[in-house]
Image (spheres, helix red, strand yellow):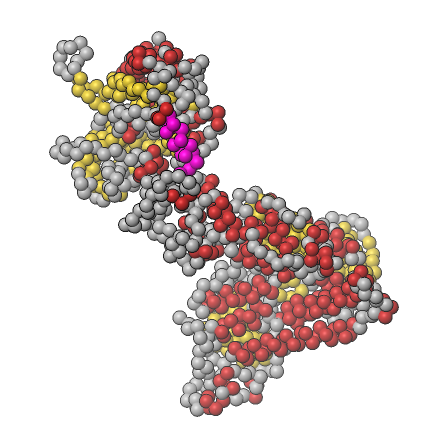
Amino acid sequence: MLKLTRNVVRPALHALTRRPAPSSLLSQSRFFSSDLPDHTVQGMPALSPTMEVGNISWRMAEGDEFVAGDVLAEIETDKASIDFVTEDDGFIGKLLVADGAQEVPVGAPILVVVDSVDDVAAFKDFVAEGGGGADTAADTSDIADTSASASAPSSAIPTTTILPEFMLTPAARHMSQSSGVDATVLFPGSGLKGRVTKGDVIMALKEGKVLPPWVEKESANSASGVKPVAAVAAAAPTATSTAGPVPIPPISNTGPFETVPNTSMRKIIAKRLTQSKAEVPHFYTTVVVTLDDALALRKELASNFGVKVSVNDLVIKASAMALRDHPGVNLSPTVDISVAVATPSGLITPIVPQTDGLGLSEIGNKVRDLAGRAKNNKLKPEEFQGGSFTISNLGMFGITEFSAVINPPQAAILAVGGGSPRLVPPKDGKGPPVVVTEMTARLSADRSKVDEATAAAFLQSFQDYLSSPAKMLA
Amino acid sequence: MIQCQPSYQTAIFLINPLSFTMLSRSTLTFGRSLTRLYSASSKLLNDFDVVVVGGGPGGYVSAIKAAQLGLKTACIESRGSLGGTCLNVGCIPSKALLQSSHHYHDIMHNFEQHGIVVDKSAVGIDVGKMLEAKAKTVTGLTGGIEHLFKKNGVTYLKGHGSISGPNEVSVALNDGGNEAVSTKNILIATGSEVTPLPPVPVDNAVGKIVDSTGALDVSKVPEKMAVIGGGVIGLEMGSVWSRLGSEVTVIEFMDRLCPAMDKELTKKFQTTLKKQGFKFQMKTKVMESEVVGEKIKLKTEKSAGGGEKEQEFDLVLVATGRRPYTEGLGLDKLGIQTDKLGRIEVDSHFRTAVPNIYAIGDCIDGPMLAHKAEEEGIAAIETIAGFAGHVNYDAIPGVIYTYPEVASVGKTEEELKEAGVNYVVGNFPFAANSRARANGSSEGFVKVLADKDTDRILGAHILGPNAGEMIAEAVLGMEYGASSEDIARTCHAHPTLSEAFKEACMDTYDKPIHF
């Protein structure tokens, strides 16, 4: 999974409480406004799915420099005390909540991170817009449907005397019903007293807002036209299935819930990947890559030349060169790497064409452009159909390793986890063990097209290039 | 907080010769009030909750509403009858004449095609009788308002009102003498008067150069009539006499009729009037006038200068506009401001600089329409009574009662273009409407303007039969924030003229069926 924000925050265990670190939801926004230097506003991370608030004890001060692995703060929830560890480098621009702040809600902006110590002064009087983190949290977490709350309105639902049957104007009702969704939840709309108009429905559909499915009024609960919203893992809506499998029994009502129908995009993805998993003989080869040199290169490019390159860009570059060296895995005249991007309507894989011929920043720019447009549903078909190889990176979620499903007709897909510090024996065998940052990459390959030796050779090259990035220049 | 039910009439009335005309509910129940006659204050006309100055559509509607809400209300009017300009010398009499003249014109020109044999030499127009019918309509309605006042318990004061203090109105009674009325709130609804045109001085008594008031009492059909001012009033009055046989020439300063209305609408309207025999002199101004015996000589030239012409007419109607009437109200002394056009300045709740003095209708900013005054009056009274009063100025229709009628609500295409709003247009001609065709009257069209992205109706413009009634559908839709598709998906009876509106909406967002 590709994430383009630079700062990755991952909770680490507090020495005294041995709890597995839960995956954090990213809650940050990157800003490139013209009146302030580039900065990232970090929101309070949700360290567990049920966490709502936490107390912050800062371990760093404004103006401090931090590197990957530093503890920025200790966050206390009702369940545990967890270190707020950063995997990136930067400077503390401004602490937006005081040390010892209690009951800071998840998503509330807590920290401004800048790239240079000189930028710190610009944020002296900075005030963040509240809730910026919450939006991005919802945005970045949609890779996992289970935590998605796609249309996250506030908890207070306005009351109305308008009967549900008159909440939608005739055209709004027609459009809503034709789209298979119930737009009544858009109340209050722009019509008189909040009636939902055709314009409201047009806008909601354009924004890709997920609405509950349209249900014929006889069977729907007509208690109120305004349905309270809470997200639930979307099962295929039983009402719409015509023939086929046993209908899923109704979920017991322990509280308000909302069924979210699959978008057509997700339906297609489901079909293709099920077929892939079932029919393509997958086999898996894993390699561990030492990232230190790559991270050092990153840092040098950033600090000495102002060139920003992400770890993922390096992964893509290394893969491209390895694919060029091992055409048996690419199995295509050109190397065109598909990069997996999560969008509100599903996973899409825009292609970086002729990746092996691109420099690191070119790759970075291309990926950022594609991912941005992917999220707004503005990709042209030729930009995501095709490709010779796919890379999927879940590192920013704290995933250490995973296995991905091949996108046919490609021959392989590389699943990349996040870097983590490991204690390893010294290189030349002498002296104490050293701490290095290691990353696990797993190649899923199609055994009917690629054999184990080819796969292994490819991975070896990949590892070579990524662990010694200077070789990418040779 | 005022309760929403009629309050007890606790006022005590001394039966005063001057006030025989003032009837109130408590005097009707004279027996009951007699016992209170000696027990409380004996001051007359005291402590009203609201006094309305002006009994036109804005004033009388406000007064009735106030009384219905339980406020002790008085209404002051000096004309001698209620209903203001509208009922007495405006909307109502002109519509009566338009109807009468329309019948005449219909017989003379349209009955034949229906197979009705008309001996045109036997058909004539008795102007005197036509004016009588008009007068009867007017007195019937003005009397009706007086009846409503009695029914609702509004104290009707016949005289000229002036505000002597924030809580006092002084009435110079028509019958002589003065009355001082104390009140908590004052609502100014004094309306407007004709704006004089200096080169063409009006003398309704003589009846040669007249304004709209005089035009309603013209005793015989003028052979040649000049209408100075191509606005609503001029065109309507011109229509009356044109139908009865006059040659009507409209002299207008601007390049088109009704400049504030939609351009396409006014251009097509002008073409229609031309077919009816109207003559137009656009971009023309009148420099001089002279009454010579039974004729009037007008000297005109082009608005930009040059092109001098001298023309002769039998009747000249000056209809170049109206201005607020606030004569003798004493606004200066109270510190109430008027702008350079004479309009009283008010805030969004119709309050003047003096917080308990309100102003509505023609004497404040906004279109000079009776229904606008009524809406404002009700809103102001509701504010006084402690409720929320609101006027939606985006959905106030305007109608011209010529034939075919012209009606408009919302934005014009020009306004939308200027505001940079992306819009779509839907059009439907009455020639394609079955009912209009069956009626033998299918001139005109319906135009609907909607937002390009949301399809929300932004304006509607109609030229055609019944436009004034049909526009109500557009107004209602706009109040609800309707899209053109909403109206298109609403069932309209067949065969009706209103289907044309539906089809225009269909053309706006999609395609019409019948064109």
Label count reads 0
Report x, y in % for residue B190.
58, 69
Task: Pick the residue in front: A223 or B458.
Answer: A223
Q: Locate residue B98 relative to residue A408 in the image: left or right.
A: right
Quadrant (top left, top right, bottom left, bottom right) of the C terminus of chain A? top left
Give the residue at x 49% y 68%.
Answer: B381
Report x, y in % for residue B386.
43, 67
Q: Locate residue B161 relative to residue B119 in the image: left or right.
A: left
Report x, y in % for residue B353.
48, 63
The magenta region covers: A262-276
Task: Pick the residue in front: B441 or B219.
Answer: B441
Q: Locate residue A76 relative to residue B158 in the image: left or right.
A: left
Give the residue at x 69% y 76%.
Answer: B136
Quadrant (top left, top right, bottom left, bottom right) of the N terminus of chain A? top left
Magenta segment: does it hold A131?
no
Quadrant location of residue B363? bottom right
Residue A115 visible? The answer is no
Q: Is residue B344 above or below residue A79?
A: below
Q: Is residue B217 above or below residue A113?
A: below
Residue A390 visible? The answer is yes
Give the residue at x 83% y 56%.
Answer: B310
Quadrant location of residue B438? bottom right
Magenta segment: does it hold A274?
yes
**Furthest residue in direction right, as rendered:** B121
> Would you say the magenta stretch is mainly helix, strand or loop?
helix
Report x, y in % for residue A6.
32, 28
Give the residue at x 60% y 70%.
Answer: B56
